Image: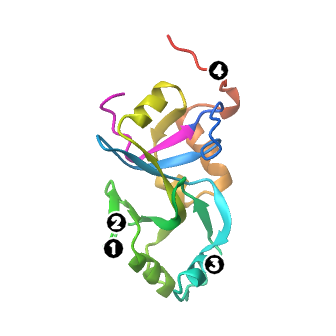
Amino acid sequence: MQNANLTGNFLIAMPAMADPYFAKSLTYICEHNEHGALGVVINRPIDMTLQTLFDQVDIALENPEVANLPLYFGGPVQTDRGFVLHQPVGAWSSTLAVGDDIGLTTSKDILEAVGRGEGPARLLVTLGYAGWAPGQLEHELAQNAWLNVAASASVIFDLPWEERLVTAMTMLGVDLASLSEVAGHA
């Protein structure tokens, strides 16, 4: 697991995950390299809509189709900052391309474009992100804290949040209910 690159994968929290930030979470890994890993939790809506966010940052939201989209708890790091996971990648001021077709953007220009109805076709907005120091995610994987599977844009952008974790487990060929909370090592 030392040289694994999980960029573009889902992390599925194992049933024994005690950390309240990540219990029963599905996290999309946006970057994983020798410097650590960065991802966003995609199945934890918070009690806030895109309209509320736009009101708080003083951006006009002229696109009623996205006004009621929920914001998500993306992770415990920088929870006062917005992260926009979107497809297509586009050309925004501060975007991390995750593969060829998904981007994670932190610059205000993407929100302004969304407000005008000119933003990316698919988006999910989080407050905060999940971060791991070098080797930390590999250690957690070795401790059976997570399962991983190649991510699917349709799970991120097309499914209701309640279905994302179960669908990711199905992609892995595992039933979450059948997993034991006790890890074993051969």
Residue 25, quarter of the rendered image: top right
Position above or below: 122 against 43 = below
Is most of the magenta stretch helix, strand or loop? Answer: loop
**Residue at 38%, 66% in the rendered image:** 88
**Residue at 60%, 50% in the rendered image:** 164
- Separation (CA) of disc 1 from disc 2: 6 Å
Circles 1, 2 touching at the beta carbon (< 8 Å): yes
Residue with the mark numbered 2: 95
N-term mark: 2 or 3: 3
Residue 52, quarter of the rendered image: bottom right
Residue with the mark numbered 3: 52
N-term mark: 2 or 4: 2
Camera-side mark, 3 or 1: 3
Residue 173, quarter of the rendered image: top right
Would you say 103 lies left or right of 117 here?
left
Q: Which mark is residue 136?
A: none
- Separation (CA) of disc 3 from disc 4: 41 Å
Q: Is residue 53 magenta?
A: no
Residue with the mark numbered 1: 92
Residue with the mark numbered 4: 182
Dot 1 falls on a residue whose secondary structure is: loop
* Residue interval drawn in magenta: 1-12
N-term mark: 1 or 4: 1
Q: Amino acid at mark 2?
A: Thr
Give 100 or 125, whichever is nearer the viewer.
125
Are there few (<14), some (14-19), or many (20+) residues within 10 Å of tag 4? few
- Separation (CA) of disc 2 from disc 3: 23 Å
Are there few (<14), some (14-19), or many (20+) residues within 10 Å of tag 3? some
